[in-house]
């Protein structure tokens, strides 16, 4: 298991390093990035709802989340 | 578009500088790709504020929504004859407010309240079907008498800097039998002419459980657990229309991680399940965003790989398409596939549990399975100028979730009969003042 966790960490690090090497886009070329659908969080309340449901019904921890609040029993 | 470095006279350069500054403000204030990871860590216990901006709001924003969650009845062929078949249903109400902070510049506040009312029956334990010639499991359900309410309250303070943001949040969640308190910090910084954003976050949670009917069913009387989560990520703008994100999340849980309401059965009868007291989880997340000008639509792709020290591996694929409808609306079809392997102490049923065995569970949530879900969200909105430029929006959404042992990425010999299918309906309204 620790080997899998290490592989996961290393591959994540590699992706992060590769991503930062990309060429820049000038500020005046970024108007489409201002759209909310180009962002990384879905609607806050929807993310909140879905995070809690998946935390209660599945065993995985979603990316970027500590899981859900409450017992999650039943 | 004009390029300022191609201009030769002073007036034109001034105009270009003004345009560039305006676009920079647009890109940084609404550019959630730059504010990329803001909701991530502070969403611990699922309470995310909107990833709305990289600058404080200048008005009060309110989001109110209601949801109805309903699980399908368990199939008659999967349940012990005569047992209850009814499962859970939940009504959920959510309120989010984002407001400028009084007395402080470049600071705003998030308030979230969630109230849930839950009722129904739940999978209790699994037995081997002795009437079946091949290995088959049947579910024993609790009576549909469970009733509980959950309230979750969270407050966050966001401080915006020239090239980043820092936030602190805290909150509590309580049910009849459960109390959780949590706090977290996270921040982000832009680099590379704001093409790259790095984020870091930390959260801690302390939970106490006091199970109902503990004496009658031999449950624990009161137990506790601690959870710590560390998060790091980078988002990168790739082109005028595309961006990528990668993140790593690590979670350490210690204490009572067992579900006190689940039991396991062997030849000697049913007893409370038992899980290890520690768990380490790591999740690698990857995301991609691409806007298509020709159809004014945006593709969102997300993948997450999760591994933990209970030997569970999981893969999650998320696909969303945001299609603009004229100038006032949007339709968003969604698709999700999830697959997990089983925990190393899980078995769908036990013939015999030796005394020296420490951990055992037949909980369907620790079983190997795959899940498919699909949904549709409709949004509409506008601005009422005569009401002080009031911005408003409405949405309605539906999601269907189905799980099955045969849909797992690996082979599953005997699927857990408690696997769940559900419907989720939601609607809400937002506005500013």
Image (cartoon, rainbow, N blue to C red):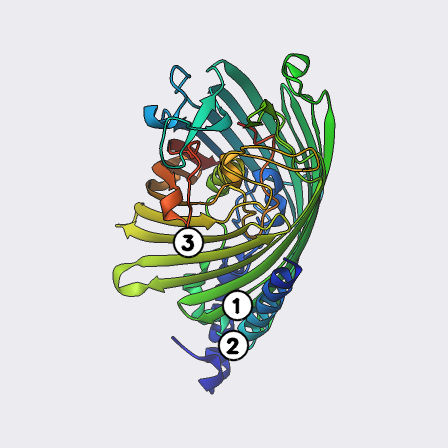
Q: Going from the N terminus, do you reach mark 1 or mark 3 first?
A: 1
Q: With B126 as the anchor, is B358 left or right in this view?
A: right
Would you place residue B297 above or below residue B20 in this image?
above
Residue B316 lies, in percent from the top left, at 46, 52
Which of B389 and B294 lies nearest the eye of the viewer?
B294
Residue shown at the point (67%, 34%) measured from the top left: B171
Which of the two discs, 1 and 3, sits closer to the camera? 3
Q: Which residue is mark 3?
A: B409
Q: Which residue occupies the extreme front position in the image?
A: B133
Residue shown at the point (61%, 33%) measured from the top left: B353
Residue B354 lies, in percent from the top left, at 65, 34
Q: CA distance from mark 1 to mark 3?
A: 31 Å
Residue shown at the point (46%, 71%) measured from the top left: B238
Q: Secondary structure at mark 3?
A: loop
Would you place residue B268 above or below residue A60 in this image?
above
Which of B218 and A73 lies nearest the eye of the viewer?
B218
Q: Secondary structure at mark 1?
A: strand
Q: Which residue is mark 1?
A: B236
Q: With B281 as the anchor, is B13 left or right in this view?
A: left
Which of B70 and B49 lies nearest the eye of the viewer?
B70
Category of crowding for the residue at label 1, using alpha-carbon neighbours closer than 10 angstroms: few (below 14), some (14–19), many (at least 20): many
Quadrant placement of the N terminus of chain B: bottom left
| Image marks 3 and 2: residues in contact by CB distance under 8 Å | no
Q: Secondary structure at mark 2?
A: loop
- Identify the subunit bearing mark 3: B
Q: Which residue is mark 2?
A: A22
Residue B128 lies, in percent from the top left, at 45, 30
Q: Residue A38 lies in what quarter of the image?
A: bottom left
């Amino acid at each position: 298991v620790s080997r899998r966790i290490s592989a996961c960490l290393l591959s994540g690090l590699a992706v992060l390093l590769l991503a930062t090497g990309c060429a820049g886009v000038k500020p005046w070329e970024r108007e489409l990035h201002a759209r909310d659908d180009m962002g990384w969080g879905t609607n806050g309340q929807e993310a909140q709802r879905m995070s809690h449901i998946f935390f209660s019904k599945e065993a995985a921890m979603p990316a970027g989340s500590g899981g859900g609040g409450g017992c999650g029993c039943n | 578009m004009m390029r300022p470095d191609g201009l030769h006279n002073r007036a034109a350069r001034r105009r270009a500088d003004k345009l560039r500054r305006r676009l920079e403000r647009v890109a940084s204030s609404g550019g959630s790709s730059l504010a990329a990871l803001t909701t991530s860590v502070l969403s611990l216990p699922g309470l995310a504020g909107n990833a709305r901006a990289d600058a404080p709001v200048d008005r009060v924003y309110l989001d109110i929504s209601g949801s109805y969650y309903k699980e399908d009845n368990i199939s008659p062929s999967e349940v012990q004859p005569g047992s209850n078949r009814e499962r859970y249903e939940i009504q959920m109400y959510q309120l989010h407010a984002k407001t400028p902070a009084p007395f402080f510049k470049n600071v705003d506040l998030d308030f979230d309240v969630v109230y849930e009312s839950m009722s129904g029956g739940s999978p209790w334990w699994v037995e081997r079907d002795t009437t079946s010639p091949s290995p088959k499991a049947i579910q024993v359900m609790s009576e549909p008498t469970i009733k509980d309410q959950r309230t979750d309250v969270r407050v966050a303070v966001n401080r915006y800097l020239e090239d980043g943001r820092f936030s602190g949040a805290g909150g509590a969640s309580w049910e009849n039998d459960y109390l959780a308190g949590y706090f977290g910090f996270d921040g982000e910084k832009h680099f590379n002419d704001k093409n790259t954003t790095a984020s870091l976050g930390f959260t801690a949670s302390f939970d106490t459980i006091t199970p109902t009917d503990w004496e009658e069913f031999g449950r624990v009387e009161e137990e506790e657990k601690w959870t710590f989560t560390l998060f790091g990520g980078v988002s990168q703008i790739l082109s005028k229309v595309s961006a990528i994100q990668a993140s790593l999340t690590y979670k350490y849980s210690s204490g009572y991680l067992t579900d006190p309401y689940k039991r396991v059965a062997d030849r000697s009868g049913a007893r409370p399940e038992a899980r290890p007291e520690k768990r380490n989880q790591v999740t690698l997340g990857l995301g991609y965003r691409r806007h298509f000008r020709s159809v004014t639509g945006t593709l969102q792709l997300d993948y997450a790989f999760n591994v933990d020290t209970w030997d569970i591996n999981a893969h999650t694929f998320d696909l969303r398409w945001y299609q603009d409808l004229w100038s006032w609306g949007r339709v968003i079809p969604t698709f999700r596939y999830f697959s997990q392997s089983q925990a190393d102490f899980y078995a769908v049923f036990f013939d015999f549990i030796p005394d020296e065995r420490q951990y055992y569970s037949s909980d369907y949530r620790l079983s190997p399975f795959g899940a498919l879900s699909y949904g549709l969200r409709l949004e509409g909105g506008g601005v009422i100028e005569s009401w002080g430029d009031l911005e408003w929006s409405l949405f309605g959404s539906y999601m269907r979730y189905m799980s099955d042992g045969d849909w797992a990425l690996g082979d599953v010999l005997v699927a857990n009969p408690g696997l769940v299918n559900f419907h989720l309906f939601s609607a809400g309204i937002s506005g500013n003042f």
